[in-house]
Image: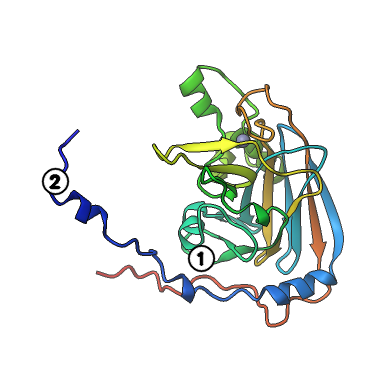
């Protein structure tokens, strides 16, 4: 290791500056969402079987909930523009604009060039969890999704029910795109109900058993027409392992709720206004 310079303490002691002017984010009128939600009716239910995934669609202006049923279970969520698979959830930018873990009032942002909020979190029954003594929180946007390539690299085992494979199969079934082509559209997820963080000493990604219990849910408002894909992770509550058949796994329920009236003052967000010239 290279030696510390004499002014190491001074260099380390510089103030931490929040990277983005997040006060300039478009405001979220949660009251308006809650009012619209009050008049909403459930129009669809999709049960995601353990160690598998399903897709669902949500029109702009409607809500969807991911509900824990039967037992503690983590879900890996992908979101797409329902009309264009190349516009998809961007976990990295969501992390930069909000935090490592998201909750009520935060938004799930989409990829460039449209870069607009795809969904807004309107309810989260695990909001109470906050951050625990290990620095762990719930619903992270720091993990990717369990995948068979990493499993092969680390353990030399072919395993076909990682979230990446589950999401790929579900997306192939829905779109008709061959599995090997559609898997490129599977992207870094919102780790729904998953409890994760970085270890204090080495900053390594860790997981611990999810605090979710049957009846808990996280609810989203669809800002644009959405195609969602949700995998019930083979890790179950992700308290011990993932990417294998060892953990107890449970289904997850997706409910789609249609509101009678859109939230007062709401319009579906347009694509980002940058003119895309990228001029020198
Ligand atoms: Zn997984």
Question: As displayed, is residue 162 above or below residue 229?
Answer: above
Please name the colour scheme applied to the rendered image: rainbow
State the SS at label 2: loop
Residue that appears at 55% across and 28% down: 148
> Quick one: quadrant of the C terminus?
bottom left
What is the C-alpha distance between the residues marked 2 and 1? 44 Å
Q: Position of residue 124 (x, y in %)?
A: 70, 57
Question: As displayed, is residue 206 above or below residue 24?
Answer: above
Of the numbered discs 2 and 1, the one sitting upstream in the chain is 2
Q: Quadrant of residue 159?
A: top right
In the picture, measured across the screen, residue 18 lies left or right of residue 172, that is left
In the picture, measured across the screen, residue 2 lies left or right of residue 211, that is left
State the SS at label 1: loop
- Image disc number at residue 5: 2
Circles 2 and 1 in contact, beta carbons < 8 Å: no
> Quick one: quadrant of the N terminus?
top left
Question: As displayed, is residue 165 above or below residue 141?
Answer: above
- Image disc number at residue 243: none
Dot 1 corresponds to which residue? 114
Residue that appears at 68% across and 35% down: 237
Q: Position of residue 152 (x, y in %)?
A: 51, 22
Number of numbered discs:
2
Question: As displayed, is residue 40 above or below residue 244?
Answer: below
In the picture, measured across the screen, residue 77 lies left or right of residue 64, that is left
Q: Position of residue 221 (x, y in %)?
A: 70, 64
**Quadrant field for ligand 1:** top right
Residue that appears at 50% across and 73% down: 25
Q: Quadrant of residue 158?
A: top right
Can you tell which of label 2 and label 1 is closer to the viewer?
Answer: 2
Q: Position of residue 143 (x, y in %)?
A: 52, 42
């Amino acid at each position: 290791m290279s030696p510390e310079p004499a002014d190491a303490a001074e260099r380390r002691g510089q103030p931490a500056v929040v990277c983005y002017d997040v006060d300039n984010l478009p405001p979220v009128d949660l009251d308006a969402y809650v009012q619209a939600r009050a008049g909403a009716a459930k129009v669809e239910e999709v049960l995601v079987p353990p160690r598998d995934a399903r897709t669902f669609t949500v029109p702009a202006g409607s809500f969807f909930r991911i509900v824990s049923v039967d037992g503690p279970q983590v879900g890996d969520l992908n979101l797409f523009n329902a009309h264009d698979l190349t516009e998809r959830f961007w976990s990295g930018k969501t992390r930069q604009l909000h935090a490592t873990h998201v909750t009520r009032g935060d938004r799930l942002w989409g990829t460039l060039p449209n870069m607009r909020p795809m969904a807004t979190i309107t309810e989260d029954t695990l909001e109470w969890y906050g951050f625990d003594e290990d620095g762990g929180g719930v619903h992270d946007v720091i993990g990717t999704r369990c995948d068979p390539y990493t499993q092969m690299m680390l353990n030399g085992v072919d395993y076909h029910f990682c979230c990446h494979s589950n999401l790929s199969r579900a997306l192939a079934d829905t779109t008709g795109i061959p599995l090997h082509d559609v898997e490129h559209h599977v992207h870094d997820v919102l780790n729904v109900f998953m409890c994760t963080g970085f270890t204090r000493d080495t900053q390594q990604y860790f997981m611990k058993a999810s605090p979710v219990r049957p009846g808990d849910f996280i609810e989203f408002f669809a800002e644009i027409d959405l195609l969602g894909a949700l995998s019930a992770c083979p890790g179950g509550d992700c308290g011990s392992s993932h990417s294998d058949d060892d953990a107890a796994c449970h289904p997850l329920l997706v409910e789609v709720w249609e509101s009678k009236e859109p939230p007062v003052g709401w319009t579906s967000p347009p694509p980002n206004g940058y003119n895309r010239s990228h001029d020198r």
